[in-house]
Image: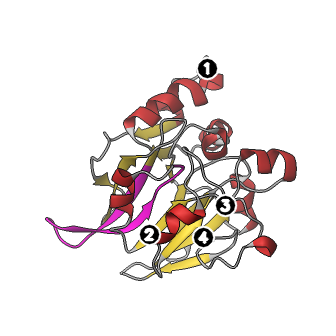
Amino acid sequence: MDKLSILVLGVAGGAAHVYEGHCSSSFIILKNDEPFCLVDLGLGVTRSLKRYGYQIPDKIIITHNHTDHAGELPVVLRVEEAQGKQLCIYSAKPVSERLRKHRIAEHLDLYCSSELAQWVSPLPEEEIQLSDNLSIAFYVGQHSECCFGFVIYQQKDLTESVPLIGYTADSGLYPELYSKITQCKYSIYDAREFGNRWHASLEEVNPFLDNDSYIIGHGIEKVNSLNHSALLFPGQLINIER
């Protein structure tokens, strides 16, 4: 069976990149230590990926159209296309429509969106193939922009799949989404030290955490980590046991 792991690229928001140079919240799923699927492509992600010795993988999941999650997408699509590589962008259909109309608008006088990427745009909660034995489904969250978390399922056989990796993406405490994420063997939650309607707080997320649950998007530097063991930091590697 293929070895899977998660490498954290960044845990910050857009302002932290613009003003302080920190990488936006993102992680990459590695298969046999090689890039398999990138999760979000906000500000600073491409350089962070290269810093760890990896190239942009063929598959990219975009959770929503905020700059700190999709800001580098137009440039990366154009550069990769010029090098003869068409990336495959996975996002829920409402997000995909925003990306294709607004995020890559700077290219649309010269290219149609299908020339720049393959857009895989399932309906919310529709499970689709990600690889031979992995599938993905998107679940809506509670955020200021149309945003979807997701669950990656491991397919045991032709009729059964089990929830393996779940990510809320940017979301407030939203029971419908959390009910899906908590079923996963590995769960990643968006949370802030002080939450609001659009981002859960560390205190709100705490009851949902177990030994294989983690927090991203917190923007807290490691030296000020509040001794919270679930906080992820850039460069951290999570080995996925299946």
User: Which residue corresponds to the image point at 45% horizontal and 29% vertical from the top-left?
Assistant: 97
Looking at the image, residue 3 sits to the left or right of residue 39; the answer is: left
Horizontal and vertical percent for residue 231?
63, 71
Looking at the image, residue 228 sits to the left or right of residue 4; the answer is: right
First in sequence, mark 4 or 3: give its number: 4
The residue tagged 1 is 110
Measure the alpha-carbon separation of dots 1 and 4.
35 Å
Amino acid at pointer 4:
Leu
Horizontal and vertical percent for residue 147?
48, 42
The residue tagged 2 is 208
Amino acid at pointer 3:
Glu
The residue tagged 3 is 193
**Neighbours of disc 2 within 10 Å: few (<14), some (14-19), many (20+):** some
Measure the alpha-carbon separation of dots 2 and 3.
16 Å
Horizontal and vertical percent for residue 14?
72, 45
User: Which residue corresponds to the image point at 33% horizontal and 60% vertical from the top-left?
Assistant: 179
User: Magenta segment: does it hold 154?
Assistant: yes
Question: Do residues under tags 1 and 4 come within 8 Å of each other at their CB atoms?
Answer: no
User: Which residue corresponds to the image point at 38% horizontal and 74% vertical from the top-left?
Assistant: 185
User: Which residue corresponds to the image point at 54% horizontal and 71% vertical from the top-left?
Assistant: 214
Q: Quadrant of the N terminus?
A: bottom left
Measure the alpha-carbon separation of dots 2 and 4.
22 Å
Checking the image for residue 7, the label placed there is 4
Residue extent of the magenta highlight: 149-171
